[in-house]
Image (cartoon, coloured by chain):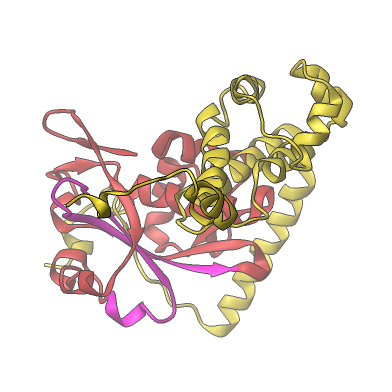
Chain colours: A yellow, B red
Amino acid sequence: MTVEKKYTPKELAESVVFPVELTDAQKKEAATQLEAVRKRRQHDMSDREKLILQLLQLKFQLEKYLEDGKYDVKKNFGFFLKKYIDILELRHKAFAQAISIDVTLLSQLINKHRDPPEYLFIRLELHSNKKIPAEYWFKLVEKEKVHQIKTDKKLRTREKAFVLSTIANIS
Amino acid sequence: MFIVDVATKNKKKVLIRPVERKDFSILTKKRFLFDWKAIQSETSIYILFDPDDQIILGAMAVLKLDAEERIEIKLLTCSRENIGRGKNYDRIAGCLIAFACQLAVEKFGYHACVSLVPKTELAVHYIEKYGMKNAGWQLYLDGERLGELINEYLL
């Protein structure tokens, strides 16, 4: 017995999306219909609705980058912080005030001239109503530090002078 | 992300990942209704699985239409034992549809849209179950509803 005969339409819709082949004319009509309703929906979409989806987008982009093993020099703490502020359409001064930090510090963080203090991760989580957890901001900085420590040749050369023996010398 | 054991009402953690070549020997027509291998070149296929025993419980093929800022669900099914009244687990299809919403929002932000072409007799049930909207030949999800499904099934 085929699944279509075995189950009710309700049961099928809860578990399956079947392939449906449309003719070229039907495909064209389907595309026009969808485009028209989407255009209307985009026009009527509230700012709140847009904000919710943009914050979700930022959250998913952060998750994807943090899960990705590759390090991207552009995607630092300042890059994502600026994206967050841009989504909210806030002036830097107003945002700095909202989380009680100096606007100069905010500028230094965005331009990567300074490492973010730990309290900032928490303040950002609170500011986003927990939409972006503190640990994401922390892990972003951590990912940068891991890359630095793995690739800093100068530091290795400098520190070599202080290591007077290694386990290779233990007989 | 979790599914629910229908008998015990216990939650079970599940994960979704892109299909790998080795999965096609499990994604048989007998258990997963369709010939998944046949559509792998033209779509992106994702599977929902139990991370404890790696058992695949559902599969979904999507088309990523970047120019239209839209993701189209071409095929989706739960494994045969999870369809109908006697199913073992609930929420499998919901998690996969919500995952398509996540892919769309991640790529297209507030312009994101997820759509599917339903079999006529199922359309009303997709609308009821997932809050999809009617656009003639296609059903679609956009705006706040994308966020609601993501919250309901993935977060």
Q: Position of residue A15 (x, y in %)?
A: 29, 52
The magenta segment: B36-65
Magenta region includes residue B51:
yes
Residue located 79% across and 43% down the image: A111
Q: Quadrant of the C terminus of chain B?
A: top left
| Residue B81, placed above or below residue B73 | above
| Residue B150, placed above or below residue A20 | above
Q: Position of residue B108 (x, y in %)?
A: 64, 55
Q: Position of residue A95 (x, y in %)?
A: 80, 25
Q: Residue most toward the top?
A: A100
Relative side of A150 to A13, left or right: right
Q: Quadrant of the N terminus of chain B?
A: top left
| Residue A168, placed above or below residue A60 | below
**Foreground residue among B124 and B2:** B2
Relative side of B96 to A87, left or right: left
Relative side of A111 to A76, left or right: right
Residue located 25% across and 77% down the image: B35
Residue located 34% across and 57% down the image: B17
| Residue B17, placed above or below residue A11 | below
**Foreground residue among B128 and A111:** A111
Q: Position of residue B122 (x, y in %)?
A: 37, 55
Please indicate, yes or no, whether residue B49 appears anywhere in the rendered image: no
Relative side of B28 to B107, left or right: left
